[in-house]
């Protein structure tokens, strides 16, 4: 007997049986995350095929369809786990990661172009559909087996089980049941929904904000600068450390010549590898925002952002966000007086793949729009520098600030070098490009402070999160550096109790402060002796 597989193609029973067994086995032995152990003993394929072998032929197509659908679901979750593992160093979470596919498509399509990205996506989808069709037809060798064929297949399963048990007994690892992975996803889904419900309840019960003075910063422009993917790994991994420490030493020298002094420490970020908006929200809300559901609950709440605190105390507030290319309704919660998204910054040059404009232009536009004009109010600005965002190619040099203009001066650099699709074939090149991108961002900031900043400017410079595991290696911390710069000794004296390192290099053994704790500590430090009239909201710890 032969089984129809695909049009114009036929499976012999033995071939179909082998294809089905190997396909199920391959999915069962794949580790849950990249870099995990491959465990070569897997009993589940044998149990599943034995069940099919015993069931009546009348249920043939329905059973094969059911097994194929279950296989498709497990395969989808496995691919999702690998994608989030490569990007964020953790498994996919059904409850928290619903927006990641759209975000991933945005980065991927802008990095290599919409049409190549669409072709790649269609090709992957086609291969997966072909695999599912192949499995559906190959399973017929098990559901349609009769007489001697059934006995042969039963013997094959017996040998398979025996070999699996021997491998499990001899090897360092036993079988990894697929149902354990499925149970993990179900548990994560339940925990995250329960966590979100507790978080929302805590937000509703949080105390009304007290008076905001920020007298210790009176009359000063305050600039919060998030540097994309600026993480602790840069200081601890030999591949990056020498370059970064040399750059920060030069940074310290340059700002010192301009009259600035710095203090540096560590913050623990709520995310790794991406989702920068979670780090922004954590720092500016004083709450641990480690997932999209928590972020959405925050945005719907009346929690007062740090931006609004500045506004209450008499500052004008602005956001400079070159990565925002679409409508951004969430901006209303932060309470900015003015938002400068990508289209509002006047950049006429070419984009650098996903990066809409280089950091030097972003800082130039910020200076023109908010620091140069003489106003009666001081300004508090939240800015994001994105040249160090993946894919980290190409990277421009630091140019003379007087030549920046409308940004067209960067066009030749935007077209230079290999495209991301070539660079990302080699992990070593990716790491080298990442280091160049971070070095560029730090050099640009140092030049900006040294040449463009004014005496009444206070800067808070920090990383939003660690980069992806391809850059950090496995088991890296979530810590990011943070620096506070000022020409006024009283500003840095206000944070003496924080015991941060003098200069631009944080102390290697200094403890890291959770990023959400910065909010209340900052407000207390610069209250100018005024009593804080409301404690920070005590909300439930995040579900892991």
Image: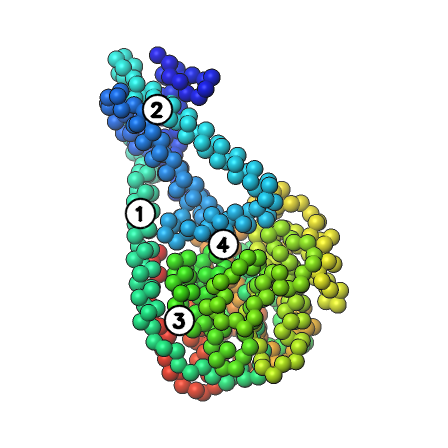
**Numbered disc in front, either 2 or 4:** 2
In primary-sequence order, the first of circles 1 and 3 is 1
Residue 544 at x, y = what percent? Answer: 35, 56
> What separation in Å lies between label 1 and label 4 (alpha carbons)?
24 Å
In primary-sequence order, the first of circles 2 and 3 is 2
Residue at 47% in and 47% down? 101
Residue 411 at x, y = what percent? Answer: 72, 54
Residue density around tag 1, few if under 14, some if 14–19, many if 20 or more, within 10 Å: some
Residue with the mark numbered 4 = 273
Q: Is residue 380 visible?
A: yes
| The disc label shown at residue 81, or none | none
Q: In the rendered view, does 525 fall on the left or right side of 207?
A: right
Q: Is residue 514 visible?
A: no
| The disc label shown at residue 302, or none | 3
406 relative to 416, above or below = below
Q: For the N terminus, which image quadrant?
A: top left
Residue density around tag 2, few if under 14, some if 14–19, many if 20 or more, within 10 Å: many
> What separation in Å lies between label 1 and label 3 (alpha carbons)?
32 Å
Residue at 30% in and 50% down? 187
In primary-sequence order, the first of circles 4 and 3 is 4
Residue with the mark numbered 1 = 186
The answer to whether the residue labelled 2 contacts the one labelled 1, judged by CB atoms less than 8 Å apart, is: no
Location of residue 368 by image quarter: bottom right
| The disc label shown at residue 139, or none | 2
Q: Secondary structure at mark 2?
A: loop
């Amino acid at each position: 007997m032969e089984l129809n597989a695909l049009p114009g193609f036929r499976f012999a029973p033995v071939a179909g049986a082998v294809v089905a067994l190997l396909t199920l086995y391959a999915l069962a032995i794949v580790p849950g995350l990249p870099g995990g152990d491959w465990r070569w003993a897997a009993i589940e394929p044998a149990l599943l095929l034995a069940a099919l072998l015993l069931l009546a032929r009348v249920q043939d197509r329905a059973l094969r369809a059911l097994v194929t659908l279950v296989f498709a679901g497990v395969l989808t979750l496995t691919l999702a786990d690998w994608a989030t593992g490569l990007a964020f160093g953790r498994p996919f979470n059904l409850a928290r990661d619903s927006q990641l596919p759209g975000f991933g498509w945005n980065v991927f399509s802008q990095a290599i172009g919409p049409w190549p990205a669409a072709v790649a996506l269609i090709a992957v989808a086609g291969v997966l559909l072909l695999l599912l069709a192949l499995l559906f037809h190959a399973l017929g060798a098990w559901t349609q087996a009769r007489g001697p064929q059934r006995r042969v297949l039963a013997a094959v399963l017996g040998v398979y089980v025996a070999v699996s048990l021997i491998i499990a007994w001899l090897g360092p690892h036993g079988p990894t049941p697929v149902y354990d992975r499925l149970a993990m996803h179900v548990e994560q889904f339940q925990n995250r929904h329960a966590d979100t419900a507790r978080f929302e309840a805590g937000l509703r019960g949080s105390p009304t904000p007290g008076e905001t003075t920020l007298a210790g910063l009176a009359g000063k422009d305050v600039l919060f600068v998030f540097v994309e993917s600026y993480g602790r790994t840069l200081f601890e991994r030999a591949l990056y450390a020498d370059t970064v420490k040399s750059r920060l030493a030069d940074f310290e020298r340059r700002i010192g010549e301009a009259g600035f002094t710095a203090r540096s420490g560590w913050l623990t970020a709520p995310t790794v590898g991406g989702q920068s908006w979670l780090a922004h929200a954590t720092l500016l809300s004083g709450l641990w925002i480690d997932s999209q559901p928590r972020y959405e609950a925050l945005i719907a709440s009346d929690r007062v952002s740090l931006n609004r605190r500045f506004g209450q105390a008499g500052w004008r507030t602005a956001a400079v966000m070159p990565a925002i290319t679409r409508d951004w309704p969430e901006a209303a919660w932060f309470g900015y007086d003015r938002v400068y998204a990508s289209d509002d910054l006047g950049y006429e040059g070419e984009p650098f793949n996903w990066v809409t404009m280089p950091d030097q232009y972003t800082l130039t536009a910020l200076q023109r729009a908010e620091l140069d004009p003489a106003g009666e109010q001081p300004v508090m600005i939240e800015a994001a520098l994105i040249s160090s965002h993946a894919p980290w190619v190409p990277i421009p040099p630091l140019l003379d600030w007087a030549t920046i203009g409308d940004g067209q001066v960067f066009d030749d650099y935007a077209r230079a070098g290999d495209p991301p699709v070539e660079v990302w074939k080699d992990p070593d090149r990716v790491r080298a490009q990442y280091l160049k991108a971070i070095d560029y961002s730090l050099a640009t900031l140092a030049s900006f402070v040294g040449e463009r900043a004014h005496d009444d400017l206070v800067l808070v410079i920090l990383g939003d999160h660690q980069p992806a595991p391809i850059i950090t290696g496995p088991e890296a911390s979530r810590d990011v550096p943070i620096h506070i710069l000022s020409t006024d000794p009283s500003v840095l004296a206000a944070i003496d109790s924080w015991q941060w390192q003098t200069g631009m290099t944080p102390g290697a053994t200094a403890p890291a402060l959770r990023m959400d704790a910065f909010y209340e500590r900052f407000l207390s430090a610069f209250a100018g002796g005024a009593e804080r009239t409301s404690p920070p909201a005590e909300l439930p710890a995040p579900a892991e």
